[in-house]
Image: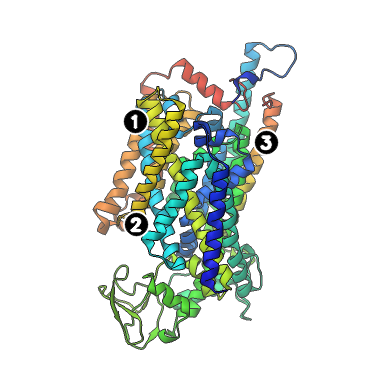
Amino acid sequence: MTTQTLIYLFVGASFALYIGIAIASRAKSTSEFYVADGHVNPIVNGMATAADWMSAASFISMAGLIAFQGYDGSVYLMGWTGGYVMLALLLAPYLRKFGQYTVPDFIGARYYSSAARVVAVVCLIFISFTYIAGQMRGVGIVFSRFLEVPVDLGVIIGMGIVFIYAVLGGMKGITYTQVAQYCVLIFAYMVPAFFISFLITGMPVPQIGLGSAVADGSGLSVLQKLDGTLTDLGFTAYTDGTKSMIDVFCITAALMIGTAGLPHVIVRFFTVPSARDARKSAGWALVFIALLYTTAPAVGAFARLNFVEMVNETPYTQAPGWFSNWEANDLIAFNDRNGDGVMQYRSGDPFAGAPVFTGETGASGERLVSNAPVEGENEVYVDRDIMVLANPEIANLPGWVIALVAAGGLAAALSTAAGLLLVISTAVSHDLLKQTFRPHITDKGELRAARIAATAAILVAGYLGIYPPGFVAQVVAFAFGLAAASLFPAIFMGIFSKRMNKEGAIAGMVTGLVFTFLYIAWFKLWSPESNIAENWWFGISPEGIGVIGMLLNFAVALSVAAATKAPPLEIRQLVDRIRLPGNAGA
Amino acid sequence: MDESENAGPKSETPESEEQCIARESGYWRANIRLLAVLMTIWFTVSFGCGILFRDFLDQWSLGGYPLGFWFAQQGSIYVFIALIVVYVRRMRAIERKFGLDRE
């Protein structure tokens, strides 16, 4: 069987599985639609949380980022796992004990205020749509490269699949589909990693392989060899970063705290039976996530090593097949500066920006670009997003492994998209309609509204996937920064400070939100040319500024709360109740 | 949550309201102490070993990994898992101690 047939087979079979699960677990009430009736086993929920959490960014982009950033890539590894410790210890059990459906529910009730609820809904919708646009790009990349269909059609197929199981099944359908998607994506990630680790080091377990010697008789460890190869070509050593320590510190912290404040992750802990199960479930979620996150640095390092060896000083006419495949998809380009037909891969840019192809081909058959020239010797442009998807081809693995990776990438993107869509539709039907504007809506009416909202959200997400606004990639920092600066402090103080009142919480959320929004928007949207370390406050990049936003939020909230009157007695009793496990104090 | 299965105090003899409040605040203090210890370890392995003291730790290595680099890309994640496992177990013990372990 050809690789292409295998890809259709694997992707088709996985889609059939998701739809089958969705039909078997159709939601009948709002409780089933929002939180699967609160009856999900903690291990199952941990697995679903892991699939929900690991998006196209984790599956497709992260190892590529690490491959090209080396040590600096650690911010993603620690940031996107350390947040689960905060979630398990500081938020999840108490939010479960609170026992409603959503994050704005908690903020609205704890701060006895519709204004606080609406601020939370605004943060939530903004964060979730930013995030979902990225998932759709991932779906588009996988479809266009592996299924040889146009990106637009790929996005529409993806949206159709999500529509079936998110709109019909709600949280119940999504949970069980995500379990299947976790299995597909983790298997798809691990199999090529084991193969490649074994090929390079003779040690199949990638976590150990990265710390082993290269099996080429040189006696060097993988990291030593990589450091040597890269410094020879003018790059920074792999184990050294280029970011300043304070920036690495702040980005890691912003990602951790942002993770703990992301609504689509938090809501997963509303689906287990008790506060005790919420703790356990966060632990299982981290175990399932860590499996991929400890493999990613190995995948990144091996991919970089293979890439340099296969591409550098190779004549274009002898380039491997995957090179021209990805070139045909605009994600690789060769700019033959010195006209020798040989690809020199060095530090620096081959030309300014992303490639703009002229449609003509050069002397060796490479696709010509019309980008402005820049100084330097590098002749190869490579998009970081291809590393994981191209890895099996780069390492010459069999066709079924490539097919598996295609199915895995789609599983990662679709599972996260579904979780986000659910959060958005819940925010509209429950937080806005039921709790704010139409309190007398029936359960059936609310369920219908949730389904309509989910459908509308799918259409918007599909539109964003087909016509991605240019700034999408630029504003991913928004999602984490805003979650860290607005939602996390409000929830945290709601649990751990009985004195925190609505005036303090609202002032804090608005301060954190506005400050973080303006800082990121200034450097990413309004004045991107000034986005250099010299202009950053305290040397903190827009990616890490959420931490400062969070500190401001805490400072403003505590001072305002101290100057205004304490929350009413029933709110202090509510806090007492959520602090106790089980039904105690209910 | 089933409001009907309201869990009362564990003992047969009804306890006074003061005793109940003392028990619950004792539980909360034990919880906060545990959180403080675990969050300190959390900060030390990730921000400490992986970032702030990374260069210092890199003078040792673990297999082919410089130690600080290992903490940043592998070790901190393993410790995170261990922290949640310890938290789940210790919380169960604390709940038992303060008679709050009934569903």
Does label 2 or label 1 sit earlier along the sequence? 2
Q: In this rendering, does residue B43 appear at all?
A: no
Q: Please rate how many residues cluster around mark 2, counting C-alpha atoms within 10 Å: few if below 14, some from 14 to 19, many from 20.
A: some
Amino acid identity at mark 3: Arg
Q: Is residue A520 above or below residue B20?
A: below
Q: Chain under label 2? A: A
Tag 2 residue: A466
Q: Is residue A48 above or below residue A563?
A: below
**Which quarter of the picture shows residue A554?**
top left
Amino acid identity at mark 1: Ala
Q: Please rate how many residues cluster around mark 1, counting C-alpha atoms within 10 Å: few if below 14, some from 14 to 19, many from 20.
A: many
**Is residue A151 left or right of A8 when viewed as pictured?**
left
Image quadrant in which the C terminus of chain A is located? top right
Q: CA distance from mark 1 to mark 3?
A: 36 Å
Amino acid identity at mark 2: Ile
Is the image coloured rainbow, by chain, by secondary structure, or in one colour?
rainbow
Q: In this rendering, does residue A427 appear at all?
A: yes
Query: What percent of the width, then of the height, locates residue A507?
Result: 34, 30
Q: Chain under label 1? A: A
Q: Nearer the viewer, mark 2 or mark 1?
A: 2
Tag 3 residue: B90
The front one of A203 and A540 is A203
Q: CA distance from mark 3 to mark 2?
A: 49 Å
The front one of A74 and A396 is A396
